[in-house]
Image (cartoon, grey):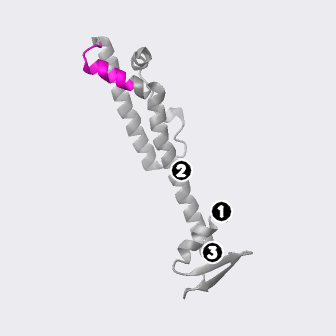
Amino acid sequence: MKYIVEALDELCAGAVWQYADGKLTILEGDIEPPTDKQIRAKEAEIAAAKEREAILAGIRTEVGRRINAHASLPTQINLSAAAGGGILNEEQMAAYKAGLVWIDQIRQTGKALLEAADPNYADDDKWPKVPEAAAKLAALF
């Protein structure tokens, strides 16, 4: 019954209807009222779609959260400037590149989780680990 209004809006499109005390009345419009079975099926469809939308939004948020937990936006900007400006030594540059590869892996993992609409997207085991050298370098900035 959580999505009864949305279900009835879809099933009774073009009609004016009233739902009270568990009874549907078509007030205006030439449509056959949907059956209880049709209403429950539409409610289930809407609930599944809303759950999927929430999972997809959560995955997108999780991608950003994981990247920003490793390196905040200011850290990312400062690292990028240092790399572009030639300030990083060879070891640091390798760590920087490892971090960039890791970010790409995070994004690719996010895409795979989106395709699967995986409700367990927050499990750490599903995500690549930050390379130690990249984590140490980010901590310097």
Left or right of 127: which side holds 88?
left
Question: Is 33 drawn above or below residue 80 in the view shown?
Answer: below
- Residue 37 is marked as 3
Q: CA distance from mark 3 to mark 2?
A: 26 Å
Q: Amino acid at mark 2?
A: Ala
Q: Magenta region's main secondary structure?
A: helix
Q: Position of residue 106 (x, y in %)?
A: 41, 34
Q: Position of residue 6 (x, y in %)?
A: 58, 67
* Residue 8 in view of the camera: yes
- Residue 89 is marked as none
Q: CA distance from mark 1 to mark 2?
A: 16 Å
- For the record, the magenta segment spans 76-88
- Residue 2 is marked as 1
Residue in view at x 49 percent, y 38 percent: 62
- Pointer 3 and pointer 1: residues touching (CB < 8 Å)? no
Choose mark 3 or mark 2, whichever is in front.
Answer: 2
Q: CA distance from mark 3 to mark 1?
A: 15 Å
Q: Position of residue 9 (x, y in %)?
A: 56, 72
Q: Residue furthest right?
A: 21
Choose top left, top right, bottom left or bottom right for residue 26. bottom right
Question: Is 136 drawn above or below residue 4 in the view shown?
Answer: above
> Magenta stretch: residue 15 in it?
no
Could you tell which of marks 3 and 2 lies nearer the N-terminus?
A: 3
Residue in view at x 51 percent, y 41 percent: 121
Q: Position of residue 36 (x, y in %)?
A: 65, 76
Numbered circles on residues, count: 3
Residue in view at x 38 percent, y 25 percent: 76
